[in-house]
Image (cartoon, grey):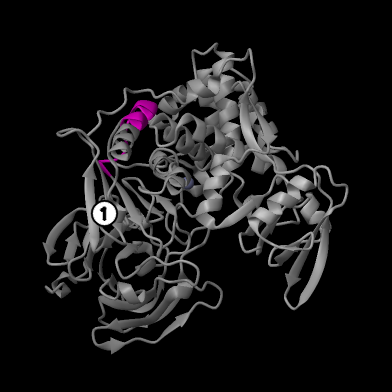
């Protein structure tokens, strides 16, 4: 292993062009302990003597919440030269650390360990790591993240390779040093690494900006992207270009971790996205179907969320709270485009797209819960509800303009402009309304306010109906729900009795207002028997079917801790799953919306 300790650079204080002081930090990360879920890091922070407060990032862009993993931070030491400094955590703000810096000290060394396992999910395994720089950095309180320049370096386990939007300036063995960037850009440029690594090009040779997928996985097989998917992701790049009309990045890296050992998530950035999926996404059709909109979603955020950002989410640094009142645009419209682009690029076929939409619409339509019931599904409404609202907007634009205009036009105006380096243009509600009016004059403020402020218990299904389809329920399985059942080992009876359970009978969720809820059944219980017979998926389905004619309620014997009770579920509708069916005589706008704007990318 080659050394990386030469990368700790002397810190300097230099005045910037704007008269503000730019602070030069260096950050060296040692990820060689990734398998043990430890990252070691050292940050050199320029300071002057006297009382100094250093902070650990709290409000993380894209999370919309104060999620900086302070509880995973351990082994923190502050040093001036060889002298260990006393420190005190702020009594109110647990992200702030107070130091007394001795005379003559120009910089403080912060060393820390980060635990990458939080009990539920992990950012590392024996084979991969997902490094989020905000988790291993400190900076002086009150300073803007744009005013901090960071020279970052990393040391990886031997033989591992990495992907990131950062520019390496020096590589040696499994170590790399990156060109200095602002703290803003560093936090916006995560790094993934692993023993099994593969990069594929998405842009035609010579075309700028360059787009690549960097994959790391638990095995060589897990990162074998199929030719069909490769063609779809090439088309995704072209489709997004056609939709938004400009690109606000110099290059784009889809960072993709394929692992069942680490978190399945997505986090957007200007020039990259951090995507975590199951290991078998290229080989298992169900996993593929479920994850198909992830990369399109995160890619869309480069425009919607990063380039254009709600004013309340544009903050000077990571300690300032974010205000998320426009997340129905930031996340809601991104959810819409994630799903539409998955269909336009063939990542989902037309039927899978509609089944997914039916499941989303049915979920919202059924699970409109009273506010006191904090069902986990309803905790981030702005994703699925935003999806339906923007479908409503798109179909309304198309109908009002006789098919001449659409949300595509809105995107070009609102997110397009001049291509170039990453920049942020904040917006407010009024700006969204004004751009919609520019596309098609209509009372958009009223339209949106009605839907956003609606206290209705039902989902906004207008977009589906305007699109020439309607939501129905039949005893045929919904393919999206079936995929989720297969990958999660669950049985989803949300739209019949109103409960989701594992195939062993462990109740995962009970939906308020449904027969299962009325019976007293709750999450955490375990169903032992159905109508006197030992529980299994087949026994349950048979009992649901028999219940159509039977006048007796379903008798579910359930274990609740040390107690047993029989719950009487008064339900006679059989199996029920949501689907979309065509409304005859109405134009198929949903079909129009999912048509690609570009010619399909040439197959490999
Ligand atoms: Zn998102």
Residue name at image x 21 percent, y 67 percent: 12
Q: Is residue 184 visible?
A: no
Quadrant containing the N terminus in the rendered view: bottom left
In front of the other: 131 or 278: 278
| Place of residue 151 in the rendered image (x, y in percent of width and height, measured from the top left) | 22, 62
Task: Please state if 396 lies on the left or on the right of 155 as rendered.
Answer: right
Vertical placement of residue 7 versus 291, above or below: below
Residue name at image x 59 percent, y 50 percent: 380
Vertical placement of residue 343 versus 313, above or below: above
Q: Which residue is mark 1?
A: 164
Residue name at image x 41 percent, y 73 percent: 53
Q: Is residue 519 visible?
A: yes
Task: Please state if 517 lies on the left or on the right of 196 as rendered.
Answer: right
| Place of residue 267 in the rendered image (x, y in percent of width and height, measured from the top left) | 42, 52
In front of the other: 354 or 380: 354
Quadrant containing the C terminus in the rendered view: top left
Within the magenta stretch, is there residue 321?
no
Residue name at image x 43 percent, y 52 percent: 266
Task: Please state if 194 lies on the left or on the right of 454 as rendered.
Answer: left
**Location of residue 4 (image quadrant):** bottom left
**Location of residue 243 (image quadrant):** top left
Q: Which residues are magenta?
A: 238-252
| Place of residue 599 in the rendered image (x, y in percent of width and height, measured from the top left) | 31, 22
Residue ranking furthest to the right: 551
| Place of residue 559 in the rendered image (x, y in percent of width and height, measured from the top left) | 74, 71
Within the magenta stretch, is there residue 244?
yes
Q: Secondary structure at mark 1?
A: strand
Crowd class of label 1 (few under 14; some 14 to 19; many from 20; radius 10 Å): many
């Amino acid at each position: 292993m080659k050394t990386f300790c030469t990368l700790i650079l002397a810190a300097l204080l230099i005045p910037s062009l704007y008269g503000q002081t730019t602070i030069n930090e260096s950050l060296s990360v040692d990820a060689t302990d990734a398998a043990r879920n430890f990252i070691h890091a050292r940050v050199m922070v320029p300071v002057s003597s006297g009382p100094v407060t250093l902070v650990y990032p709290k409000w993380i862009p894209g999370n919309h919440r104060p999620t900086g993993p302070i509880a995973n931070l351990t082994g923190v030491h502050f040093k001036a030269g060889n002298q260990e400094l006393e420190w005190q955590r702020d009594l109110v703000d647990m992200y702030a650390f107070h130091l007394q810096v001795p005379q003559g000290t120009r910089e403080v060394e912060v060393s820390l360990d980060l635990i990458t396992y939080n009990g539920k999910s992990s950012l590392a395994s024996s084979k991969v790591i997902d490094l989020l720089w905000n988790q291993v950095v400190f900076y002086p309180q009150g300073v803007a993240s744009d005013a901090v320049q960071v020279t970052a370096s990393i040391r990886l386990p031997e033989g591992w390779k990495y992907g990131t939007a950062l520019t390496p300036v020096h590589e040696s063995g499994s170590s790399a040093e990156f060109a200095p960037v602002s703290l803003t850009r560093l936090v916006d440029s995560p790094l993934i690494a692993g023993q099994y690594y593969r990069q594929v090009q998405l842009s035609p040779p010579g075309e700028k900006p360059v787009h690549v997928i960097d994959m790391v996985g638990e095995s060589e097989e897990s990162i074998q992207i199929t030719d069909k998917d490769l063609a779809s992701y090439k088309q995704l790049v072209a489709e997004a270009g056609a939709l938004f009309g400009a690109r606000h990045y110099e290059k784009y890296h889809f960072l993709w971790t394929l692992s069942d050992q680490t978190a399945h998530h997505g986090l957007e950035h200007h020039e990259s996205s951090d995507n975590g999926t199951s290991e078998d996404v290229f080989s298992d059709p169900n996993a593929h179907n479920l994850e198909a909109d992830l990369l399109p979603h995160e890619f869309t955020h480069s425009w919607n969320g990063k380039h254009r950002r709600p004013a309340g989410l544009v903050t000077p640094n990571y300690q300032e709270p974010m205000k998320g009142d426009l997340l129905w645009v930031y996340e809601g419209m991104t959810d819409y485009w994630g799903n539409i682009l998955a269909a336009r690029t063939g990542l989902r076929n037309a039927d899978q797209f509609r089944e997914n939409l039916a499941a989303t619409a049915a979920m919202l339509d059924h699970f409109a819960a009273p506010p006191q019931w904090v069902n986990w599904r309803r905790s981030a409404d702005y994703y699925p509800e935003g999806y339906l609202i923007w479908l409503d907007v798109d179909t309304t634009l198309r109908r009002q303009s006789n098919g001449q205009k659409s949300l595509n036009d809105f995107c070009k105006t609102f997110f397009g402009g001049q291509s170039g380096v990453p920049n942020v243009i904040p917006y407010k509600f009024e700006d969204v309304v004004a751009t919609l009016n520019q596309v098609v004059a209509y009372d958009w403020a009223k339209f949106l306010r009605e839907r956003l402020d609606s206290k209705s218990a039902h989902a906004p299904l207008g977009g589906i109906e305007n699109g020439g389809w309607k939501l129905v329920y039949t005893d045929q399985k919904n393919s999206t729900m079936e995929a989720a059942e297969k990958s999660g080992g669950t049985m989803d009876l949300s739209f019949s009795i109103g409960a989701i359970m594992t195939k062993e009978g462990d109740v995962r969720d009970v939906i308020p207002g449904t027969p299962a809820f009325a019976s007293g059944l709750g999450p955490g219980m375990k169903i032992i028997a159905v109508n006197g017979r030992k529980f299994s998926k087949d026994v349950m389905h048979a009992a649901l079917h028999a219940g159509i004619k039977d006048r007796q309620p379903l008798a579910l014997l359930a274990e609740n801790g040390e107690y047993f009770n029989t719950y009487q579920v008064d339900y006679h509708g059989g199996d029920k799953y949501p689907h979309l069916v065509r409304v005859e005589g109405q134009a198929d706008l949903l079909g129009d919306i999912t048509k690609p704007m570009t010619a399909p990318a040439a197959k490999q």
